[in-house]
Structures are given as C-alpha cells and as structure tokens.
Amino acid sequence: MFSDLSPHAERRTVLVVDDSALIRTVVSDLIGGFTEFTVVGTAADGVEALERVRALQPDIVTLDIEMPRLDGLAVLDRIMRESPRAVVMLSGAESRGDVDLTLRALELGALDFVRKPRAAGTQQITLVADRLHEALRAAAVANLAGVPALRESARARFRTPTPTRGAAAVIAIAASTGGPRALATVIPALPADLEAAVLVAQHMPRGFTGGLAQRLDDASALHVLEARHGEKVRASSVYVAPGGLHMTVVGGADGARVALDDTPPVWGVKPAADRLFRSVAETFGPSAVGVVLTGMGRDGSEGLRAIRAAGGGAVVQDRTTATIYGMPHAALEGAGADRVAPLDEIAAHACDLLAARRSPQ
C-alpha cells in the first residue's frame, strides 16, 4: 500500500539493527531528529532482529549486512518471506565484497541502502543524515506489493556475438529507488536480436554501478557493461551510467558515442535521466524509446517529453507494480506515454514501440 507522509500522519516506526553499538546510537539519534519517524527498538544481531520484528512490528527496518549469529541477507530473506516490510540496508565501505552484498540485498527486496559514516565528524554525519532521511521517506511510501518476485536465472545460454556495428536505435531507461530489482526483470527480458542499444540511468552512488552491470550481464542475452567515456554506442549492448557521473550520447561521423561528465546534479541526482533522455532525443530522434521505472522524484519526465517531441516512443511503469510511483507518475503528468505497463511487460512494449519507430537506416 502507499503511505501518507503529510504533517498530520502518524509517525512511521523504525527498528535499527547493527552489531556496532556506536552505529546503533548514531542512526537512532539521526532518526530521532526526523519528524516523520520514531525508533521503536534496536537489535545487535540477526537473531535478535527477527525477534524484535515479530514483537514490535516496525514499519521500517534499517539493517546491517554483516552481523554475528545471522547475517543481514539471511534476516532480510526471512523478513520478506514471513512479514514483508520496508527494509533499508546499512552498507559498509565500497569494497567489492560490500558492493556485491549490497546489490544482493537489493535483489532480495531491500528498497535502498545507506553507507555508514566512515568517521564521527560533523560533515560525515550530515551526509549520512540527508541520505538516511531520503531513504526512509522512500520506504514510507513504498508499494511492497510492487516489489517483483526474485527470479533466479543462470547466465543466458545464447549470447549475441560481440557487437561491432554502431546502434541506429536506442531504448533509454530511467530508474531510482527499487530500480536494481526492476532492471533485473526488464533487461534479461530483452531479446538477443534487439538490434539496438540500451542506455540506463539508475540513481546510484559511485562504486556500485559496475557491480550492477555485471549482475545484469550474468542474467541477460545482451551484453551489459558500465559505460566508459568516448566509447561507441553499439547495437545489442546495454550501457549503465556510472554512479556519480552524468551520461549522455553525442552523434558523430562514425555514429553515437558515450559522453560522461561530472557537472552538478539534476533534481539532486547524478546520473540524471533527464540529461540522458534529452541527448537521446537529439541524437536518435524517432529511433528512440524512453522508459521510466520506479523511483522517487520527477527525474526523466522532461527528458521523456523531449523523446516524444522528437518522434520517439514512451513506456511508463504502472502504479500497481512500481515500488515507488513518484517518477512514473511525474512522467505521465509531464510527458504522457504511448504505453503504461506492468513491470513484466515493459521490455515487450519497448521493443514493439521501437520496431514501429525505427528510422529506415
């Protein structure tokens, strides 16, 4: 169900789970300063966390990944199976192991993740506070029924040959909160003979999008990679914008190429889908389809309008299956859509629209 975050709404209850007493105190104090939330309890390990969830029935759980007795992934899996509720992961440093565990948590149903403070300094705490508040606000309005069932799939048996030709058509995808799990449904559903490139702007910090691209590649018939500045946009490939950088495409004599830049955030996010979508509209015109998936805010709305104005198509995820309906709703209001579809039909609709709109070249 969708929740009300109006000033008169009842405070959402939060259970804080972490094996560090310091982190439990810091996180609890931060949440205590947010007017929409209240901490109803804490837990120091996974077994205690499950006991507290059953006893306190919190609306939201902030969950550490590495804990004694029962780790965060096992706790998350039990929560989502027994009594689903919004879960925000507390992630450590961006080492490969932490990235993999965090991405696995998102696949299992966690809505978002927040990096733990690296130090007790004021600046670090402020950054964590802003990010934590954002994640909790998203968790409070999450549609848990829209979290797609996890589909375990082996690496695609048939892979397209390594592409060499430049793409003449593009599917551009915007996603934010709930996006990694949504992308795990959409990208593997795209056919090996797509004959187009796919460009993805998933709101994520630095250090995580490479792992996301690798996990999508393992499950897909198309090649999925984290985009690099200056590389050619090739058919049958999926390019994930690196966290912390904007991704656009620029035309050239030998075809479109990826451009990355570190200019200020748009709508508070980087990469921003609006930047990507507008460049796609300019470069590919009617041979483009924009897709807006789950997420908070309105990123993607203006860019989707530009794609439609250039003759391209638009697909927007429906309210029922969107974990967070903010971005899809803003896109519908600001740009409209050719198709409004549930998550498991997004890939098929995007392909249909692309086939109808591709330029003669």
Image (spheres, rainbow, N blue to C red):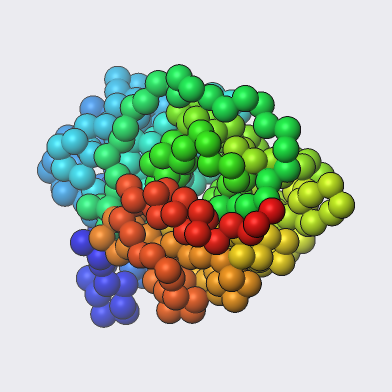
**Near-viewer residue (26 or 143):** 143
Residue 307: x, y in percent? Answer: 59, 68
Above or below 72: residue 123:
below
Residue 138 showing in the rendered view: no
Residue shown at the point (32%, 47%) measured from the top left: 344
Residue 322: x, y in percent? Answer: 33, 57
Residue shown at the point (61%, 38%) measured from the top left: 237
Residue 234 showing in the rendered view: yes
Above or below 248: residue 65:
above
Q: Residue reaching furthest left?
A: 55
Residue shown at the point (72%, 38%) measured from the top left: 165
Q: Is residue 22 left or right of residue 195?
A: left
**Near-viewer residue (172 or 299):** 172
Q: Is residue 255 left or right of residue 144?
A: right
Q: Is residue 341 left or right of residue 243?
A: left
Residue 327: x, y in percent? Answer: 45, 66
Numbered label tally: 0
Residue shown at the point (33%, 59%) measured from the top left: 341
| Quadrant assignment for the N terminus | bottom left
Residue 122: x, y in percent? Answer: 62, 55
**Near-viewer residue (241 or 10):** 241
Q: Residue reaching furthest right?
A: 253
Q: Is residue 151 left or right of residue 296?
A: left
